[in-house]
Image (cartoon, grey):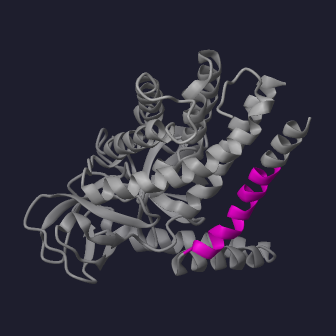
Amino acid sequence: MKWSMLFLLTALSIWTSYVYSGVVGSSILLLDPVLILLAWFCLQDEWPRIFAVSAMILLYRFSLTIATPLEVVVPPLALIFTIRMLSGGISPFHFWRRFLIVVPALCLSHLISNFILFRVFDLSIERILLDAALAFIVSATMFSVLDVIRPLLKTAKYPD
Amino acid sequence: MKRRQTAYWAIGCWLLLTLVAFGLEQLFSSPKRQEFNRSIVDQAIQQELIAESEVQAVLTRQQLMDMWLPLSANFTLVPALMTPVRDRSPLRSTGRIDRGEESGLTTGLGIVSSSGVVGRIVAVGQGWSRIQLADDPGFVIPCVDEQGHRGIIGGASYSGEGRIKFRLSHLELSLNEILTTDGSSGVFPANVYLGIVAENRTPVKESRILFPQNLGTEKEVVIFVPIEPGVGR
């Protein structure tokens, strides 16, 4: 049940990413539902499940693509590493404080993706603020849905 | 039990929101995309007259070959049918053609349509080749403006658009200026239409360049295969 739900959630996020990439254009690198789902798992879940979700995402993104392994692997890895690192200082169980972990991680992952794809490292204040605001809005929306789904993932310890 | 039901409801709502995105895509789509969608409907109608379109395809292919023949002094022309393919990486722009190794195709060869540059081959197999369209972020090619100034153009993060990546000389773009290939890469001959400047900005790297229209639609294309072995690989 837990693993099938994990697979369902990953598949759903991949599909959402596929569909919304046509709507949001290049912002999909920042607002990718797949990365937000991975961030949600990274916050408090167990490593086997993080690996399982990462493996499913990478397997999907590696197949039938012209993308380089670097641009597929590095952004999720940066996201996982940043979240796990920041979780040491900020509580990932707090409803609002967890966004202080997720938003910087998503922004960093976006910066890295942009650099790999376009060789652009845009560190202007307005760009960072806009990215942070967008990342917060979308992750807050998705997290609220994922939090409701959490009873179906029994081992996860998410905030009540 | 109630929490579980709520969870299933949440999954259902998520599914619904994803389905809504199909409708949203139409709302947010640019006039160019709407034109592209309209062209798909037109194509569907046209497919009812299969016999006629087959004759037309042969004719188009021949016209296309005749069109590019004057520029193909160092190239052999291989005709093919290009079909756009949505890549699994969200920002990549790719397509597929119905010719492969059996026609002497290799990776790196340039592809054009009647409108101009389409892209480049990135993978080859028996009877198929995967192509990187010109608006893919990884696509880069030397270009020249109307004054003869050179630069390197690449795909942007927006569909059908490109950006200047590097200036090789004093490239200063003006509105509606036409950019063409300079032939130095060995992939395309010189003077192949690349795109038009839709918005000129400073710095020049911020200028918007529109690639040939309907880049991602099914069409007849021609592949430039260099006569001298090793060129363009």
Q: Is residue A121 visible?
A: yes
Give the residues drawn in magenta, as a range: B12-29
Q: Residue at x 28, y 43 (%)?
A: B231
Q: Residue at x 86, y 37 (%)?
A: B4
Q: Residue at x 40, y 25 (%)?
A: A89
Q: Can you say whether A66 is above or below A57 in the image?
A: below
- Is B22 colored magenta in this rendering? yes
Q: Can you say whether B173 is above or below B1 in the image?
A: below
- Using the image as rendered, state which of residue A47 and residue A119 is in the foreground: A47
Residue B173's spot in the image, x, y percent?
19, 75
Q: Quadrant of residue B67?
A: bottom left
Count of numbered circles in the view: 0
Of all residues, the one furthest to the right in this rendering is B1
Q: Can you say whether A93 is above or below B176 in the image?
A: above
Question: Where's the C terminus of chain B, which quadrant?
Answer: top left
In the figure, is residue A112 to the left or right of B179?
Answer: right
